[in-house]
Image (spheres, helix red, strand yellow):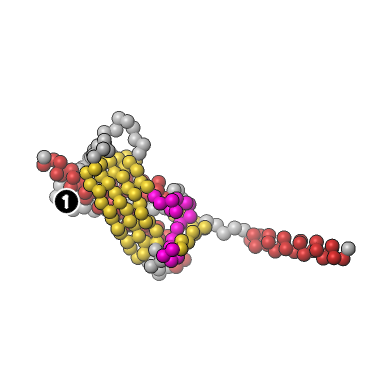
Amino acid sequence: MKSIFISITLVTLTVFLIVLPGCGGTKPSKFYMLSASGNLENPGLQTTAAEGVVIGIRRIKFPDYLKRPQIVTHASTNELTIAEFDRWAEPLEDNFGRVLSQNLSSLIPTDNVLIFPWLASASIDYQIILEIIRFEREASERVSLIAVWTILNPDGKEVLLRRKSSLGEAVDKKNTKKVYEAIAVVMSRLVAELSREIAAEIQTISQEGTRK
């Protein structure tokens, strides 16, 4: 009987120790979003040929490892860190697409930047396809955005331009308590920089079209 009592006591103590850490409550998650840049400047071309055009963002493809609510960073070249309590407020690819559309709308400028699916009656001037290769903080503390993007003609059957952008910026480490907020700020700036490159090419293509 004594041995049985000791066994029961040990089991009870083990369960108690397992449950105890959760008694203080779960650590609250923090949520982040990319933001559109409110002070974007025109790419600098001496033309407004693209002003008012209708742009359709047809597809944005993200790597599978970024398709998660947790913010992903690189601990080393081959190791990823998944921040369990620092998360995106919505799917990153959705947030990216909306911010890109807002930036392009300001840069070109146009009030007609549509994200697929759009109405069959929409008269698209240029379609855009993006494949995101990298979009996270590296082990070097820099955030990298590597994207292959394509501008297509109105029906999406002719490639007008294909380009690869490799962008990066260091994260400000002054406030280590808000490191993920700092990462989100830098990521937003890189989306703005990519938006400038795309907008500039649309302006150029549109300008060349008016000369023909």
Quadrant including the N terminus = bottom right
Could you say where residue 134 lies in the image, as x and y percent from the top left?
Answer: 37, 56
Q: Which residue is drawn at the image coordinates 29% and 44% (left, top)?
A: 128
> Which residue is the extreme one toward the right?
1
Which residue is painted at 43% across and 61% down in the image? 73
Residue shown at the point (35%, 39%) measured from the top left: 116
Tell whether position 200 is magenta.
no
Residue under numbered circle 1: 45
In the picture, which quadrant includes the C terminus? top left
- Residue type highlighted by circle 1: Leu
Instruction: Please state the horizontal and vertical placement of residue 9, each as a whole percent of the image.
Output: 79, 63
Query: What x and y, as percent, mark residue 15?
Result: 72, 60
Task: Farthest residue to the bottom: give it.
Answer: 174
Can you say whether 158 is above or below 163 in the image?
A: above
Q: Residue at x 43, y 53 (%)?
A: 66
Residue 211 sits above or below residue 148 on the image: above
Where residue 39 sits in the image (x, y, percent)?
Answer: 28, 54
**Which of these two is toward me, 86 or 62?**
62
Q: Nearer the viewer, residue 173 or 91?
A: 91
Residue range highlighted in magenta: 62-78
**Quarter occupied by residue 160:** top left
Outermost residue to the top: 121
Kind of element beneath mark 1 = loop
Q: Is residue 88 left or right of residue 6?
A: left
Q: Is residue 65 magenta?
A: yes
Label 1 Cα crowd, 10 Å radius (few <14 / some 14-19 / many 20+): few
Res. 38 in view: no
